[in-house]
Amino acid sequence: MFLGPAGDTLFYKRRVDGLDALYVFQPDTGRIEVHAQIASSKEQLRAWPTLGGYVIVCTGWPRTPVGLRFRFFDSRRISELLDRQASNLNSLLTDVPVLGDFKLERSALPVDLFEAVKGERVVLPGFFPSPNETDAQVPALYEIDGTTASYRVVPLRFLKQSTLPGALVDEPGGARRWLTVGDSNHLFVLDGQSHELVGDVIWPAEQQALARVTHHPVRNETWISALSSVFVYDRSSLELIAEIPIEEELRWHRGARVLGFIGAVVFSQDGGRALVARPLSGDLLEVDVVTRKRIGRVPCVIDPLELCTAPGVGRVFMQSLRNGNISWFPYR
């Protein structure tokens, strides 16, 4: 879930009729609320925003027999069509540029895609067919470089072949990227240029979960939400500096009593407070960033898992764990 470059258009993914689908809507148009579908797939779908205002969509993630292919949607065009012809949005999004056929050596970017990513480097995780084995696939990064007008794939040789690369989160400034891997208590820190491993972060094994990484906008801290706690790390030294218990009660989930789990973390505009999603509790927990103490609770009508802030309108968007529904409330 993320906002378009103007901050008025929300993109989110949900499962509908057995398909992974990417939706978009504008909450403040003053008209009937329309959630329009952009893309869908029987396989897993992933979408990422670029700094230049494009939305990159991959169907069949994390692997296909010939490597991943990426479609580039212009979010400005989507906003215009959503404003005029929302009901026909999917059929009107034709002639979308596609990038595939990645190789280990650099290839020249097509002109239209260079214009889409000019001046930035887009790096996306996935699997790539191993050059040494016929059927094997290896964890890799797909690099689309708008500074050199080239693209390539970079195998992550420090990962086991069976390891599923998850989210890749850039540090402020882009010097390094934090890579999560599957359901784990371990993530990796990569150099922003070479993609070489420069550090790793490990938290207690009993907190193994699908981790979510959020870099604080002001403080030199990175917050990682795991099973039932948030772990705060010094971003420079990668040292653990705090653990914040979030879910301390056993709750029913899929027929079992579990401790946790928790969802995304977002920060207030001044960086002084954090909101942590608690889907099994049906609320958001507010935490003081400095003291690490709980200072409030926001009851929700949904079971919030994903969060996204819209600073321009002072709002936090939430997405439900169970059905993918979207809700929001004012927050600055």
Image (cartoon, rainbow, N blue to C red):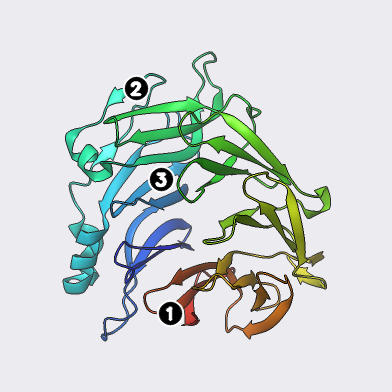
Say few, some or many: other residues with alpha carbon within 10 Å of mark 2 (under 14 / 14 to 19 / 20 or more).
some
Q: Which of marks 2 and 1 is nearer the N terminus?
A: 2
Residue occupying image coordinates x 53% and y 13%: 132
Place of residue 14 in the rendered image (x, y in percent of width and height, measured from the top left): 47, 63
Place of residue 256 in the rendered image (x, y in percent of width and height, measured from the top left): 81, 65
Residue occupying image coordinates x 18% and y 51%: 94
Cα–Cα span, label 2 and label 1: 42 Å
Task: From the image, state whether disc 2 or disc 1 is nearer to you.
Answer: 1
Amino acid type, callout 3 = Thr
Residue occupying image coordinates x 18% and y 59%: 92
Q: Which of 300 and 298 is in front in this view?
A: 298
Place of residue 13 in the rendered image (x, y in percent of width and height, measured from the top left): 45, 61
Cα–Cα span, label 3 and label 1: 33 Å
Q: In this view, does 221 lie to the left or right of 268?
A: right
Q: Which of marks 3 and 1 is nearer the N terminus?
A: 3
Say few, some or many: other residues with alpha carbon within 10 Å of mark 1 (under 14 / 14 to 19 / 20 or more).
few
Q: Is residue 242 left or right of residue 95?
A: right
Q: Mark 1 highlights which residue?
A: 314
Q: Mark 2 highlights which residue?
A: 106
Place of residue 185 in the rendered image (x, y in percent of width and height, measured from the top left): 74, 47
Q: What element carries label 2?
A: loop
Q: Which of marks 3 and 2 is nearer the N terminus?
A: 3
Q: Mark 3 highlights which residue?
A: 59
On residue 166, which mark appears?
none
Amino acid type, callout 1 = Gly
Q: Is residue 136 above or below residue 50?
A: above
Q: How many labels does the image show?
A: 3
Q: Which of 318 and 19 is in front in this view?
A: 318
